Image (tube, helix red, strand yellow):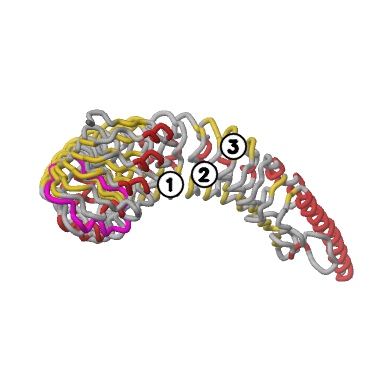
Amino acid sequence: MKLKILLFFICCCIGFHSFGSASLNEEVSALLSIKAGLLDPLNRLQDWKLSYNTSHCNWTGVWCNSHGAVEKLDLSHMNLSGRVSDDIEKLQGLTSLNLCCNGFSSSLTKAIYNLTLLISIDVSQNLFVDSFPIGLGRAAVLTLLNASSNNFSGFIPEDIGNATLLETLDLRGNFFEGSIPKSYKNLQKLKFLGLSGNNLTGEIPAELGQLSSLEKIIIGYNEFEGGIPTEFGNLTNLKYLDLAVGNLGGEIPAELGRLKDVETLFLYQNNFEGKIPAAIGNMTALQLLDLSDNMLSGEIPAAISQLKTLKLLNLMCNQLSGAVPAGLGGLNQLQILELWNNSLAGPLPIDLGKNSALQWLDVSSNSFSGEIPAGLCSGGNLTKLILFNNAFSGPFPLRLSTCLSLVRVRMQNNFLSGTIPVGLGKLEKLQRLELANNSLGGQIPSDLASSSSLSFIDVSRNHLTSSLPSTILAIPNLQNFMASNNNLDGEIPDQFQDCPSLSVLDLSSNHFSGTIPASIASCQKMVNLNLKNNQLTGEIPKAIAVMPTLAILDLSNNSLTGGIPENFGTSPALEVLNVSYTP
């Protein structure tokens, strides 16, 4: 009896070994077939060849299980192209397939639907075309499917809804069309859903609100219909919700206020209307809130002041009105506040920036009034201060002149008074200073001329007096200098030998006297020179006529003599020449 059992065991082992050898030989053949279909300019698969000394399990990108069967194929980041062979289906034990980040531009073989043991498949960041193969829903243990950043088209495979263990589904950045399959309600383990950047239409299925494991939804940049399903308020594990640029409309559901773990809420560039729900104030984990470019109206809810971890608040380009809640000034983590292009009024919170690391403030094109808060740069991080097209009054905040982080200051078209403070020229990062159309008086601070970073200065339409600082036009990076419509006088500084970048100079409508410096012709990038409405005398320098890029020259309404130099007829770029009302 024992002998019979032993013989039976030996026969079984021999049979299994024979089957195993045949199966392994088939896998080697499949791998060589895959290689034959690929273009490998970097020769990354040079070791994929038959050898008595090396098992295919040691080939680049190939991993085998303890029985010698291929279970993982990782060909990512190898600059491969060509076509993936249908013989890949012969790798029946494959659990992980990674073709990410190559140059495949063919269709993806439909044979992958036979790889029913797949746990992970990543074909992202290629140029795969045509429809995505149907059948992966048969892979009962599939947990990750990433086909993002390709050129797949057609409908999103509905059968993926059968892969009920799926945790990550990323189809972003393709050309998929049609609607989101309702079968995806079966994906109860799903944590990440990425469908953004496609051509999806129809309504967002309310059934997605049943996927209680979801932590991240990114499905914007599509052409949906309807609005946000109220059922999304049931996704209490959600941390990231991005529905931006989705053609969504209606009101923002108050039910979103139940999502207390959401850190990022992006709803920008849609057609949302109505009021911002006060329930958003209950989303106490929010760090990034962007509702910009919609049609939201009413006031900013005071409840937003409860979002103590908020770093970004972007409500620009809506139809909001009323005052900014004073409590926003107490958000000590706030870094970016964008409210521009609304109908907001009243003063800004007096302590805005005082208790936070504010980096970017843009409230332009509203009806704000009152003084500019003094502590905007208290944290020393303010880079962009954009306040133009409002009704701010009072002085330019003195503390801003010591704000070393400033890159842009845009305060034009307000009612600011007083003087431009000394110190701005010492701000080594300051590139733009725009103070036009205010009621600023006094002199242009001489320290501006010492700046090494300023490229754009506009102090036009103020009440500035005295002469220009002698070296202000020699700032090394200066491209635009505009000081028109002031009460400036004296001579134009003869400092144009060093003006490598200056392209626009507008000193019109002042009281400048003396002659036009001949050295101005050394500004090889000058495009627009406007000196009209002054008291300039003498002749027009002949060298101006040969300035290589000068397109607009306005010297009208001065006291120039000597006529127009003949060589202006051969000016290489001149399009407009105005010397009217000149003797």
* Viewer can see residue 229: no
1 vs 3, front mark: 3
Q: CA distance from mark 2 to mark 1?
A: 10 Å
Three-letter amino acid code at the position of disc 1:
Ser
Q: Is residue 62 above or below residue 89?
A: below
Q: Secondary structure at mark 3?
A: loop
Name the disc covering residue 333, or none.
Answer: none
Name the disc covering residue 157, or none.
Answer: 3
Q: Secondary structure at mark 2?
A: loop
The residue where tag 1 is placed is 212
Among numbered discs 1 and 3, the one appearing first in the sequence = 3
Q: Position of residue 176 (x, y in %)?
A: 55, 35
The residue where tag 2 is placed is 187
* Viewer can see residue 331: yes
Residue 77 as seen in the image, left or right of residue 190: right
Task: Report the magenta residues as a range.
Answer: 439-461
Q: Position of residue 383 (x, y in %)?
A: 29, 54
Q: Residues within 10 Å of mark 2 (few under 14, many from 20)?
A: many
Q: Secondary structure at mark 1?
A: loop
Residue 573 as seen in the image, left or right of residue 439: right
The quarter of the picture where residue 365 lies is: top left
